Each structure stands twice: as C-alpha cells, then as structure tokens.
Amino acid sequence: MKQKLAYIGVSFAFPFLALAASINDIGDLGDTILGIINGTLVPLVFAIAFIVFLWGAFQTFIQGANDDEVKTKGRNLMMWSIVGFAVMVSIWGLVNILTGTFSVGSTLNTPTSGVGAPFQVK
C-alpha cells in the first residue's frame, strides 16, 4: 500500500519538476502561480457555481413541481449560488485592480500603436 502511494506521489511530482526548470526567479514563480490561479482555478470555481445554480433551478422547476419543500431547497440553492457569483466577481475584480495598480503580472498595458506608443525607428 505504501509503495502505491509513493508511486502516486512521484507521478504528481513530475509536472512540478518540469515547471521548476522554466522558473528563473521569484517573479517567474509569482507569474506562474497567478497564471495557474487565473487560468485554471477561477474558471473551475465559476463552473462549479454555475452547476450548483443549474441544480437549484432543476430542483425548483422540475423536481419540486409538486413538492414545496424541494422547491424551497432549490430556491435557496439558486439564491446562494447567485450570492456566490457576486462575491467571486467582486473579489476577482478587486484582485485585478490591485494587480493593475501595483503592476504585478507579466504584461504591462503599453500601447503598440497610436498616441502614447513607444517611438519606433524604421
């Protein structure tokens, strides 16, 4: 049993070893962690919240058509999923405001053409 757990642990460690080869300094590590959070975790949490909302709608309108208790549970589930959406969107917005304010991230908002674009010699 311990040997199987060791194999599983090593198999999960290999991607991190490959990730360590591409990180040069602490800034790259921060950008990588932010990329994982923004690219994977945030959409996953939003998808789970949307599925919970759909389940609440199913309970309210289909499963609870004749049962008031199931209808109330579904309505409460839909209400709390909407509250969860609002909290997630507001926190995500605050994080983006803070990262934009303190220039944390890999891209800066510099225009490539038009007014304010860097001078280019041809």
Image (spheres, grey):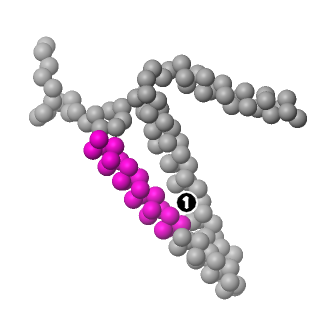
Asked whether 41 or 95 is in front, the reply is: 95
The residue shown at (88%, 35%) is 1
Residue 97 included in the magenta stretch of the image: yes
Q: Position of residue 27 (x, y in %)?
A: 40, 29
Hey, which residue is sitting farthest right in the picture? 1
Q: Where is residue 19 in the image (x, y as percent from the top left)?
A: 55, 25
Crowd rating for badge 1 (residues with CA inside 10 Å; few <14, some 14–19, many 20+): some
Region in magenta: 81-102
Looking at the image, residue 32 lies above or below residue 53: above
Q: Position of residue 15 (x, y in %)?
A: 62, 27
The image quadrant of residue 10 is top right
Asked whether 75 or 38 is in front, the reply is: 38
Hey, which residue is sitting farthest top in the picture? 122
The residue shown at (69%, 75%) is 63
Question: Helix or strand or loop: what does disc 1 sit on?
Answer: helix
Reading the image, the residue beneath label 1 is 50
Task: Name the amino acid, label 1.
Answer: Phe
From this viewpoint, is residue 29 visible?
A: yes
